[in-house]
Amino acid sequence: MNNAFFNWSGGKDSALALYYLLKDPQFSVNCLFTSVNEKFNRISMHGVRVALLEEQAKQIGIPLKKLLLPEQPSMEEYSSLMKIAMDDFRVLNFTHSIFGDIFLEDLKAYRDQKLKEVGIIGHYPLWKKNTKALIHEFIDLGFKTVVVSASDQLLGKEFVGRVIDHDFINDLPDNVDPCGENGEFHTFVYDGPIFKRPIQFEVREKVLRKYPNPDKTQNQKLVGFWFCDLI
């Protein structure tokens, strides 16, 4: 059986991929691995408080390892810290790193290249599956997830804080992937077949934050995301 750690974002794709893995006799998932913004003590990109991340791990029943990142790490800083973490996993005899990625080829290539350098194999349970079919499967399995961040250009304030159901999917604009695979939105999963008990929380303040645009081919220097705070 392959000794695996799971790159856990706290969101829906991670939850569905982990659901698949826990049913796969080839793998034993023995650690959840999550990048955390050290300054704000929140999950990187998603903005979810670490206390809720820790509650997820508790209800899933798998140990959690956190990678602490500076507020806005350079690629060099990120790669260096990630390399240290991967070396630690290899010393502990982990052989596989699991991701919830679906179709972003360049991201998968980057991950596989970095993992190869430390002798770990990447595995992608959702790879190349139809995203519309995946999100409906996710809902039908009984998972429950709330949108915690969303692009202000593509979705806007009204989408954050919403629970993803079939109505939510129908409300998405045609240019938004049903799973948000292009980064259009991010989620926090609080219930479903991988959890012992649902996670309790409240939706609080919604704020708009601006970041440097990673796409240098566009004239727009900043991109905005709406976030809602969960406590």
Image (cartoon, helix red, strand yellow):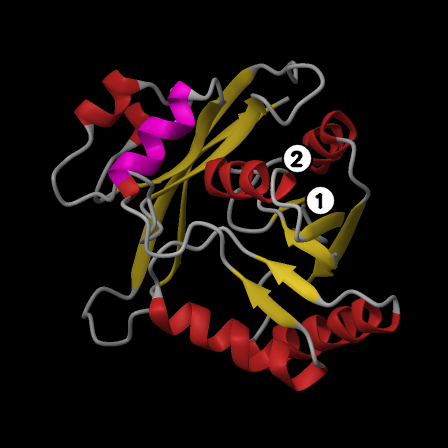
Element at badge 1? Answer: loop
Q: Which mark is residue 41?
A: 1
Amino acid on which the number 2 mark rests in the picture: Arg
Magenta span dominant secondary structure: helix
Q: Which mark is residue 221?
A: none
Q: Which residues are magenta?
A: 132-140
Left or right of 1, for residue 159: left
- SS under mark 2: loop
Q: Nearer the viewer, residue 141 or 199?
A: 141
Disc 2 residue crowd, few under 14, some 14–19, many 20+, Cα 10 Å: some
Q: Tell me where residue 151 sits by quadrant.
A: top left
Q: Residue drawn 22% across and 44% down?
A: 153
Crowding around mark 1 (Cα neighbors within 10 Å: few <14, some 14 to 19, many 20+) is: some
Q: Is residue 159 left or right of residue 115?
A: left
Q: In this figure, what is the number of numbered marks?
A: 2
Kind of residue indicated by mark 1: Asn
Would residue 220 be visible to someone looking at this image?
Answer: yes
Counting from the top left corner in percent of width and height, residue 181 is at 34, 50
Residue 42 within the magenta-colored segment of the rendering: no
Nearer to the camera, 185 or 177:
177
Q: Quadrant of the N terminus?
A: bottom right
- Asked whether the beta carbons under mark 1 and mark 2 sit within 8 Å of each other, the answer is yes
Q: Which quadrant is the C terminus positioned in? A: top right
Q: Is residue 222 above or below residue 131?
A: below
Which residue is denoted by mark 2 in the rendering? 49
